[in-house]
Image (spheres, helix red, strand yellow):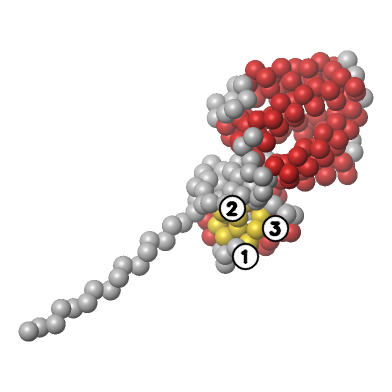
Amino acid sequence: MSEKKLEKPARPRRIRMAAPRMQKFDPTAAEAVERQVYRIVRRSLMTGAILPGGKLSTRSLAEALGVSVMPVREALKRLEADGVLESRAKSAFHIHDLSQAEFREVLEIRLRLEGLAVREAAKNFDADKMRQARALDHRIHSSRTTAQRLERNFRFHFFIYQLADMSMTLALIENMWLRIGPTLNKVVSKVRPEETYAAHAHLLAALARRDPDGAERALQRDLLQAAEVIENQLSTSSADTNAIQPRVR
């Protein structure tokens, strides 16, 4: 009686994580590779191109950007030090999903910092800057996807904040958007676009008449109407993250 040949158990299929939607890497730039990768991924977090929860794979990012794994890993380690990523595996980093308590703290900081920025920006607005701001706002209205709307909303806000001419305040605002950017995906489909447009219209009107108090009130309206929607979708403690399949542009 012949012995049956034992079959080796099939190896589990390895699932690869896709890279997120992000800007292209420029190999001709004078900027160091690791710094450029860090800046690209950082902006993707701030603009909501990377979703809350889930993982980023160093290998997938390296392939998407056309660089080696090492500078990508170094950039992600820097973002881990910034408090927005967490390393749990050899080649993957988890995106931190804010809890309700963390979100409230970020919101309080944003209301103060961004309120300060729009107050100062109101002093520097002229007709040309207003045309640029209105054009950026109009692009939000014509957005066809969530990714477009978040990216264009980011550009609109930071165009205004940069006009405050307060570099340290701007850097602090960027740090808050680094934490809140992925979470903004939770609000886009829940808040009616008309509400965002109305808040922006009030902000632009206040900036046009160089009214710091009115600009700050309009900004608070914009942030608070989104905050109410977001907070209801967050856990009372930091949620465990699950794998996501973000997209490449």
Q: Is residue 38 visible?
A: no
Q: Residue at x 90, y 22 (%)?
A: 213
| Residue underneath mark 3 | 80
Which residue is the site of mark 1?
Answer: 70
Vertical placement of residue 194 versus 42, above or below: above
**C-alpha distance separating marks 2 and 1:** 27 Å
Does residue 155 sit above or below 97 in this rendering? above
Q: Position of residue 68 (x, y in %)?
A: 58, 62
Which part of the image, by quadrant, shows the C terminus? top right
User: Which label sits on residue 240?
Assistant: 2
| Labelled pair 3, 1 in contact (Cβ < 8 Å) | no
Instruction: Tell me which amino acid carries mark 1.
Output: Met
Say which of marks 2 and 3 sits in front. Answer: 2
Q: Earlier in the sequence, mark 3 or mark 1?
A: 1
Farthest residue, direction front: 236
Which of the 4 quarters of the picture holds residue 11? bottom left
